[in-house]
Image (cartoon, helix red, strand yellow):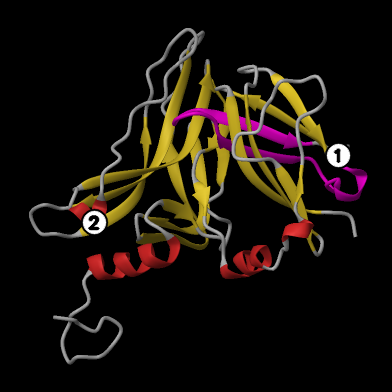
Amino acid sequence: MMEIITGYTGKAHIFSEQDRDVNIGIVGEGSYVLQTGMQLEAEVSSNNEIKIRDGVLMHQGCTASIKKNTYDSLTIINGSQGMKRIDLIVARYERNQDNGTESISLKVIQGTPEESNPAVPSHITGDIQSGDAVADMPMYKIIIDGLNITEVQKVYSEAPNITELNRKLNVSAADIISFTPLAGQNYPNWGGCYYYTSGSRVHVHLGIQALPANKVATVFVLPESVHPKTRILNIGPSGSFPGVARIEISLDGGINVTSQDTYAAADIEYDTYS
């Protein structure tokens, strides 16, 4: 029997599963950070503290937020001299199996120290709508070298808002400029490489393979008309999780990629000079 969700019935009748299904139908069944507030930006406060700034996430249809102008503080356990470690920050959904209460909170999963090539700690994928009691959304990899946090790498995806989707829908095929890697380099397209402009915005899509793992490769140089105002840095997927590609668009338009795997994918947007 069909039931109204967004309507007054005289009694409590809306269940979290219904609300999540609505969100999944609109945004998708994955896990995303929404484009509001500071978008849950990570800030290294010290070698023992990471601050996650305000924003909203949608994890398998379940929404959670950090209030505006506040932050969540996460403790990072001390590193070890001469050792390397990777910790993983996740947004963890949990359902109490005794009383059914649900929560999402940020957790640090500590990795194992190694002299070199430390592994990313495992997390619980889970399926909230199937009734799993725990489901993690990976947020950041924390790279620790000795006693110091040396890098924070974003591993989540951002959901586009309606304005952004409309802008992309209004781009015609004639506006999209496909490109191939620089002459003499064997970096074939994987999913296509192209860019287009919309007003003062430039959208660059990169899908490329046969990259030298963990080495910088300049795969293309954009024309001067679409050079960025400032250096653009993007962390995108590279192979299966936790593979990461570091993609930089320099002031001279060079697209420079350092990939942990042999391929990289990214969608990058930025403002051009006006």
Which quadrant does the C terminus fall into?
A: bottom right
Mark 1 sits on what residue?
A: 251
Distance CA(mark 2)–CA(mark 1): 45 Å
Please tell me which residue is depicted at 59% across the width and 39% down the height of the picture.
191
Q: Where is residue 45 in the image (x, y as percent from the top left)?
A: 56, 39
Magenta-drawn stretch contains 239: yes
In the structure shown, which secondary structural element does the residue marked by tag 1 occupy? Answer: loop
Quadrant in which residue 14 is drawn: bottom left
Mark 2 sits on what residue?
A: 129
In the structure shown, which secondary structural element does the residue marked by tag 2 occupy? Answer: helix
Q: Which of 219 and 11 is in front in this view?
A: 219
Please tell me which residue is depicted at 15% across the width and 53% down the height of the picture.
96
Q: Residue furthest left?
A: 98
Instruction: Answer above or below: position of 69 versus 84.
Output: below
Q: Which of 207 and 91 is in front in this view?
A: 207
- Amino acid type, mark 1: Leu
Residue 21 - label: none
Which marked residue is nearer to the observer: mark 2 or mark 1? 2
Decide: few, some or many residues near mark 2? Use Cα within 10 Å; few <14, some 14-19, many ≥20.
some
Magenta stretch in the rendered image: 223-249
Which quadrant does the N terminus fall into?
A: bottom left
Q: Where is residue 145 in the image (x, y as percent from the top left)?
A: 54, 18
Q: Which of marks 2 and 1 is nearer the N terminus?
A: 2
Q: Position of residue 190 (x, y in %)?
A: 60, 34
Instruction: Answer above or below: position of 194 versus 24.
Output: above
- Amino acid type, mark 2: Gln
Please tell me which residue is depicted at 56% across the width and 34% down the height of the picture.
152
Q: In this view, does 272 lie to the left or right of 162?
A: right
